[in-house]
Amino acid sequence: MRIERIIVADDEESMRWVLSKALKRKGYSVDMAIDGRQALGMIQDNSYDLAIVDIKMPGINGLELLDRIKEAKNDLLVVIMTAEASMKNAVEAMKRGAYDYITKPFDLDVIDAIIEKAGRAREISGQMTILKKELKERYQIEKNIIGNSTAMQDVYKTIGKVAGSDVTVLIQGESGTGKELVARAIHFNSGRIGKPFVAINCAAIPRDLLESELFGSEKGAYTGSSERKQGKFEQANHGTIFLDEIGDMPLELQAKILRVLQEHEITRIGGSQSIPVDVRIVAATNRELIEQVKRKEFREDLYYRLNVVPINLPPLRERRKDIPELAAYFLESICTELSIPQKKLSNEAVSLLVSYDWPGNVRELENSIKRAAILSNDIHLTGLDFEGIQRRSAGENPSTCNEGSLESIIDLKLRKCLTEVEKLDKGDIYNMVMEQAERPLIRFILEKTRWNQVKTADILGINRNTLRKKINELGIEVKRG
């Protein structure tokens, strides 16, 4: 069913004008509202296929308007716009039933893609289910999962979409990326809020004890078993169980997890009675499960039962844009927690943190900030407070780049200077770097040879004519020896 009639609600005149012109050019019928109250009246009196709504408007804001729309016309698809790309806005909008969420400023191509997708969605399944509004009272997820990068915005959207249903979720990502935080966010935004959230690390428990931890045991089931033990699945009844590092689970236990998913019941070790359990399963792994399936190390049937909704958490090196915000958040939290004076990061320190690849991801960043905050006597943290990061950054590839080598120094400097490559003009990077490296090199050798161009060319291993050309191109002032 094609999208034909659209209403745009935004108190900013320029945004209304741009969207009206662009959408009408695409052949859509478009109405404009200057605020939420006017938009609500128009929606009640007319039939629209899509509403594009700004989140901040006088009177009735975008989220309140979204609620009113869902009460009045549940089949109307709503896209929320905001200039504040916070996780709280993203999750809240998707939870309240928004079809999508976009951050200003945006390309008009993004709107076109959303409208096209909305038309397909109306044909396939109609309106997305309204997700429950309730947030966990104590656990404010927007204070724990930080980041406004595109990758993290997609994660927030998915959390908002899946939280209200009981579908099984598989969270994939490197160690330290925050998989358990995402699992908790899903639980505490679901209808199971107030019920148990039970986490178990499948890699941290010995194989011979893992089954007992998961399913419990009867008295006398094994040597030393003097009483009945309740397992994690029973503890999580009516709530959520988080199976972390499920890729490390033995094959024989994988079969029992599959049975829980299919039959919704467990049997304690040494017992014969099936015990019904109502548990939502959220699993996580830092491994490539599909590769384990190919190697027969992970059950294919379990993989597809777990991978109903996949959430891929990006490593920190792929969302460097989030590092300054994360670092500032950790520093403030750590100073508060340890009751030490609030400290700030210098621009030099931020550049260093952004340039580092963080193999330990967010967890490593937090630990580095904590170490620097504790050891530094200064209010402002500089690059010197992160010497360990500097050394590791310079020696990230030990096979080709020894610490202290020329290559390591160049590597470190480049990482500091080119932290935001996307802001550079296309095609400029190579020439810019080569020019800035050649000029001091040639000048240095000229100085060492007392400006003897013949000797300089020999040392550099280039033709004298090439040297002369380079001197002219690079604007090097030649002195007499």
Image: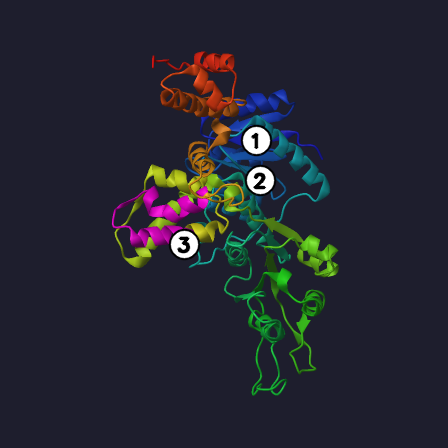
How far is mark 3 from mark 2, CA to CA?
Answer: 35 Å
Label 2: which residue?
Answer: 100
The x, y position of residue 426, in whole percent, is 54, 23
Label 1: which residue?
Answer: 7
Q: Specify the quadrant of the image occupied by residue 285.
A: bottom right
Q: Which residues are magenta?
A: 366-394
Q: How many marks?
A: 3
Q: Earlier in the sequence, mark 3 or mark 2?
A: 2
Residue at image point 62% right, 29% down: 112
Reply above or below: 397 against 169. above
Q: Specify the quadrant of the image occupied by residue 293.
A: bottom right
SS of the residue under disc 1: strand
Q: Nearer the viewer, mark 3 or mark 1?
A: 3
Disc 3 residue type? Answer: Asn
Residue at image point 38% right, 24% down: 444
How far is mark 1 from mark 2, CA to CA?
Answer: 15 Å
425 magenta-colored: no
Which corner quadrant holds the N terminus?
top right
SS of the residue under disc 3: helix
Left or right of 348, for residue 237: right
Which corner quadrant holds the C terminus?
top left
Q: Earlier in the sequence, mark 1 or mark 2?
A: 1
Per the picture, the main secondary structure of the magenta-coloured stretch is helix
Q: Nearer the viewer, residue 170 or 2?
A: 170
Label 3: which residue?
Answer: 367
